[in-house]
Amino acid sequence: MPITTLFFDLDGTISNNFVGIQRCLNFGLARMGLPRLTAEQVHPLVGPPFRESLPKLYPDIDVEMALRLYRERYDTTGWLENELYDGIAEAVRRLHLQGYTIALCTSKPRVFAEKIIAHFDLGRFFDGVHGPEFDGRFDKKTELLAHLIGHYKVSPEQAVMIGDRDKDIQAARFAGTHSLGVLWGFGDQDELQSAGASQIINHPSELQHSIQSFA
């Protein structure tokens, strides 16, 4: 069956927001009197929901307070400490022109994801921008992607989830879609292979050919 619908992750796939994420996390942790995190400690936190990942480092942390403080800085400054990956805008533009339905499926709160997509002038290429709400709804990417399959009325066999972390691949397996792991973000070959990625690519220029090969 031909591929009709593409679901893209944001952090590590469309843009690199690592600097903003680390600074906002440390802003919140410092306000709570907790030790700051190094870049090495923050790296595995990029992708999964903070409600899931932060307690692994700080078992007794008040996660909701940490999230409120994180968002306090992120809403004004953190989301701008961000850059597109080389070649991704052109790749998404070409896929849009070929007639694919393209939607963002991210673990970043929807309101922030919408600001970032608009900031980089990518909204014209996306049919929708989707992510969790602040209350935790759709925190799990498995639930979000399964919801979007229904929302876009697409057969799972005609959709591809594209992302850089194991959570993206696991969501694709849960929803029954194809999965395309990308190596320009925060995950590595072993992580994506272990999660069961259908394919793994090195550069946005490979997206078009890889997507067509699923048909």
Image (cartoon, helix red, strand yellow):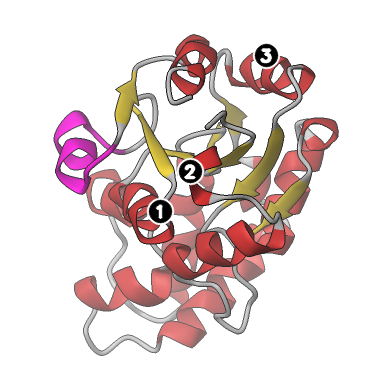
Q: Is residue 138 above or below residue 152?
A: below
Q: Amino acid at mark 1?
A: Gly
**Category of crowding for the residue at label 3, using alpha-carbon neighbours closer than 10 angstroms: few (below 14), some (14–19), many (at least 20):** few
| Quadrant of the rendered image containing residue 6 | top right
Q: Amino acid at mark 3?
A: Glu
Give the Cα distance between marks 3 and 1.
28 Å
The residue drawn where x is 53% and y is 47% is 20
- Point out the tag, 2 or 3, that comes first from the N-terminus: 3
> Residue 102: x percent and y percent?
69, 37
**Magenta stretch, residue numbers:** 187-197
Q: State the residue lying farthest toward the right.
A: 124
**Category of crowding for the residue at label 2, using alpha-carbon neighbours closer than 10 angstroms: few (below 14), some (14–19), many (at least 20):** some
> Residue 56: x percent and y percent?
21, 74
Q: Is residue 182 above or below residue 41?
A: above
Q: Secondary structure at mark 2?
A: helix
Residue position marked by numbered label 2 in the rendering: 157
Instruction: Give the main secondary structure of the magenta stretch.
Output: helix
Residue position marked by numbered label 3 in the rendering: 90
Question: Which numbered mark, 2 or 3, is in the foreground of this view?
Answer: 2
